[in-house]
Amino acid sequence: MEYTRSFSELRSLFNPEASYTEVPWSGVRIHNLEFRSSCTGDIFVSTRDKEIRENSCFTYPVFEPLRPSKKVILLLHGLNERSWVKYLPWGHWLAENTNSYVIMFPISFHINRSPEAWKDPRTMVPYVQSRNTELGATEMLSFANVALSNRLTEDPMRFFVSGQQTVSDLISLLNTIRSGNHEIVPEKANPDIFAYSIGAFLAEILMLANPENLFTESRLFMFCGGSVFSNMNGTSKLIMDSYAFQRVYDFYLNDFEENIEKKNRISEYIKSTSLGMAFRSMIDLGRLRNFREQLFRKLKDQLQCTALLKDTVIPLRGTLDTLAETSRKDIVKIHDFPFLYSHENPFPVFRDNNYLNVDRCFDMVFNEARLFFG
């Protein structure tokens, strides 16, 4: 089914509260499975954040293909997403066309791991007004990004902590699959990853660190991602405002390494574990460069990226410079769609004939992923 039609019908069909939803035109089922994070008492998560119940107990969708399969794809989303709607046709297409189980797993404090109020305009507008009063006019502030902007301004370490908790949860999930105890996905299914935007950043860290050898044979397809952090620009009405991004950028580029020299359990974890090292190496091209380059070269045949020419959030140059370290010339494919698109909305829904171009470009990108996954 064409992307535009699929988007509209899946948006109407999907019920995040239902245990499963049958997609009638394909036979694919969407299951909503419960997950309880084991990080509720973690040293990384602040006391106040531990009180956000939604982040600890939540559901995640699994697309079950029509035919039995040993293949599974983790679909990792972008920063500040508050709904699965955008990704429903992505997950469905991958399940139907690669005959894989597709797990859409929410990053910590995102999607349904965050309070409903964070995406409610009426609730968030007073916070926008308060932030404007406190900081003066800050670029790209909106009701959609004020929750994340406030949280990262208050504590930039939340960027790392959110990723660390997500990684811990994914390790738990994949070990459940490996042991044959998952409700839907069969035992020993090998995880590949389709990762978009900040999800690609997270996925690169997973591939570099390979915790518990869970990703030894995995393939990672990145869309609108792949860059080290320093070459990103998170200022967007849908991501975070300019003040918050500058605060996070300055912290990780200038203060982070000095902060982890302090002796405590968090700094020891960041300095001594493969995940901590991988995160540090993905902050800037010059940071732990030899460590990163050697691993990227080993992974060169397991990585593929599709980038968009007019992407301003994760600009093409950052992706090219980062993935050049694999020494594989064809690792990045570059497209410039013949319609008005953005990083945040690469496949807009049009009511005029432009939808035909969107459908075609969607198929082009996802067929690249299908061919890469094999």
Image (cartoon, rainbow, N blue to C red):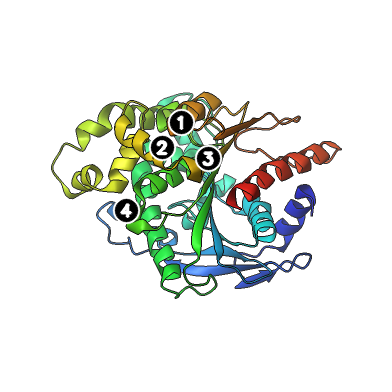
Mark 4 Cα within 10 Å, few/some/many (few <14, many 20+)?
Answer: few
Q: Which residue is under mark 1?
A: 327
Q: From the viewer's perspective, is 4 left or right of 184?
A: right
Are circles 2 and 3 on residues that touch, CB within 8 Å? no
Q: CA distance from mark 2 to mark 3?
A: 22 Å
Q: CA distance from mark 1 to mark 4?
A: 44 Å
The kind of secondary structure element at disc 3 is loop
Q: Which residue is under mark 3?
A: 197
95, above or below 337, in the image: below
| Label whose residue precedes the other's in the sequence (1 or 3) | 3
Q: Which residue is under mark 4?
A: 48
Q: CA distance from mark 2 to mark 1?
A: 7 Å
Are circles 2 and 1 on residues that touch, CB within 8 Å? yes
Instruction: Residue 201 in the image: state x and y as whole percent.
Output: 45, 41
| Label whose residue precedes the other's in the sequence (2 or 1) | 2
Instruction: Kindly indicate the quadrant of the structure image that contains residue 335.
Output: top right
The amino acid beneath tag 2 is: Arg
Mark 1 Cα within 10 Å, few/some/many (few <14, many 20+)?
Answer: few
Viewer-nearest of discs 4 and 2: 2
Mark 2 Cα within 10 Å, few/some/many (few <14, many 20+)?
Answer: some
Q: Which residue is under mark 2?
A: 297
Instruction: Residue 82 in the image: state x and y as whole percent.
Output: 55, 50
| Label whose residue precedes the other's in the sequence (1 or 4) | 4
The amino acid beneath tag 3 is: Ser
Q: Which residue is nearer to you in this view: 350 or 136? A: 350
Viewer-nearest of discs 1 and 3: 1
Viewer-nearest of discs 1 and 4: 1
